[in-house]
Amino acid sequence: RSAAEPRPSAPGVPSADLERPSAGLAGTQMEERSGRMSLGETLLSRPSLTETPRSNAVYAKMAILLPWLHFAIGITNNLQITSWREWLVHGADINPPNQALLGGVVSALPWNLKIFAAFLSDVVPICGKRRLPYLIMGFALQGAAWVSVGIVGDSISFPLLALQQFCTTMGQVLVGVMCDTLIVENVKYESGAQVGRLQTNCQLMFAAGGLLGTLLSGWLPQYAHISYTFMFVITGISKLVLLFLVVFLHDPTWKREGTIGESASATWGGVWESMSLIRVLKPLIFIFAFAMMPNNSDAFNTYLIQDHPICAWDTAANQCISMVTDDSGTPQYQAHCLSFASEYNCDRQWGGLGFSDSMFSYIGLLGSVGSVLGNFIFKAWLINAGWHIMFASTVVIACAFSAMQLFLMIRNEAGETLTE
């Protein structure tokens, strides 16, 4: 916030007291009460701000543009998802450990820089604008990264591929942070039944766009016979096209009062003040611990699209040979297959499920449908529910459904899965 924009506070209560519980019984009671508040109560408990005709007009404009921007971002974020997974396995021949390195380390690193992206946009405006220039940078970075990998194709080295993924994800982080800040800066004009509507609408449109993008990611390669690498070029160009939508967004001109160092100090002080709150610090610690847990998404996605069987015993050569080839016809997993000296072990390398492009995209489609449905259920019935029970129930249910992957992996002597 600029110095000319004071933080809102309740009538008769200093803003510092509103944010940080004071020592003694009153502070304890307020902190305990805040821990029991539902999301709806938390949002509705915000102090109201004085509205003007201009602020209402700005909100009305952004309430239309932001959801549609999220819809377009949802499409472009998922447009290459099937081609990317197929290309890693059949084109670039990246094994699951290196896929996990790309997805779990290289692509995860920019997400840890979100706070710095937000901090930088707060204290270093460009041409008096704090959001739109960084939003443009994010789209441009994503577009250039996807177009480059689409042009280079299968000849790209793993270090360059890691750099491409870092740039792509960093652009996605910039876009996400700026979209979040644009939502937050317009949510303050909501009141009463409007509270939470803009954010929920943006999430719904984002999920709906992801649904459409996931469908296209499978249909275009399989039915339109578009190559995986050209799908990357299409994704990059679509990201660049979104730059034309940015010019219609409202980003008020920000006038600095003081030096960059003073702005940085004030902004960081506000961040630290928020992080010091018990009701903020505890969720941060939990989210950090929750995110540290390993996941099997890269291995499972490879298992879904990997051909089968991987190996077969060649009686003429009396050795185990590979049965899987990449797009150029080169055998894959040759070294893996040659490591088996017996026919019994060789013929038991079942491989994956061999899902087609469209089948794999339908898996993502169901995920997008679930996201849309979850946002709708939350908006309609759960916005006033308690956070603790809702989150715990969601995690338990999600873990139970995730365990159903085992039915696709456990095989009998004939190589049939439990579902078969």
Image (cartoon, grey):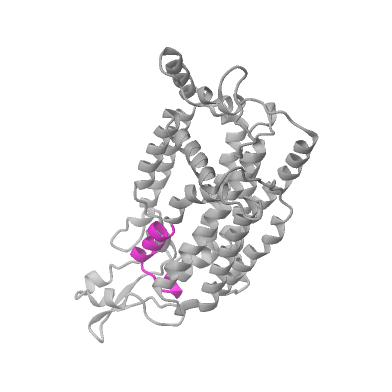
| For residue 418, above or below residue 80 | above
Left or right: 212 as drawn, with respect to 339: right
Viewer can see residue 215: no
The residue sitting at 60% across, 51% down in the picture is 125
The x and y percentages for residue 397 are: 43, 38
Determine the residue located farthest toward the left in the rendered image: 341
The image quarter in which residue 301 lies: bottom left
92 magenta-colored: yes
Would you say 129 lies left or right of 119 here?
right
Q: Which of the image's four quarters has the C terminus?
A: bottom left
Image spot of residue 18 (x, y percent): 53, 23
Please state which of residues 37 and 75 is positioned toward the viewer in this rendering.
37
Which region of the structure is painted magenta?
89-107
Position of residue 402 relative to residue 8, above or below, is below
Picture layout, residue 192 above or below residue 84: above
Q: Residue at x 59, y 71 (%)?
A: 233
Please identify the residue farthest to the front as the structure is shown: 258
Return the x and y of residue 85 as percentages of the image width and height.
Answer: 47, 65
In percent of the image, x 56 and y 22: which residue is there? 14
Check if residue 75 falls in the magenta segment: no
How many numbered markers are drawn?
0
Q: In the image, is 241 to the left or to the right of 229?
A: right
Judge by depth and name the residue closer to the eye, 223 or 342: 223
The secondary structure that most of the magenta stretch takes on is helix
How far across and down, in percent of the image, does residue 182 sit? 63, 45
Q: Quadrant of residue 400?
A: top left
- Where does the N terminus fall, quadrant-wise? top right
Q: Nearer the viewer, residue 186 or 358?
A: 186
For the question of whether residue 110 can be seen, the reply is yes
Judging depth in this view, the residue of 105 and 55 nearest the camera is 55
**Which residue is farthest bottom?**
316
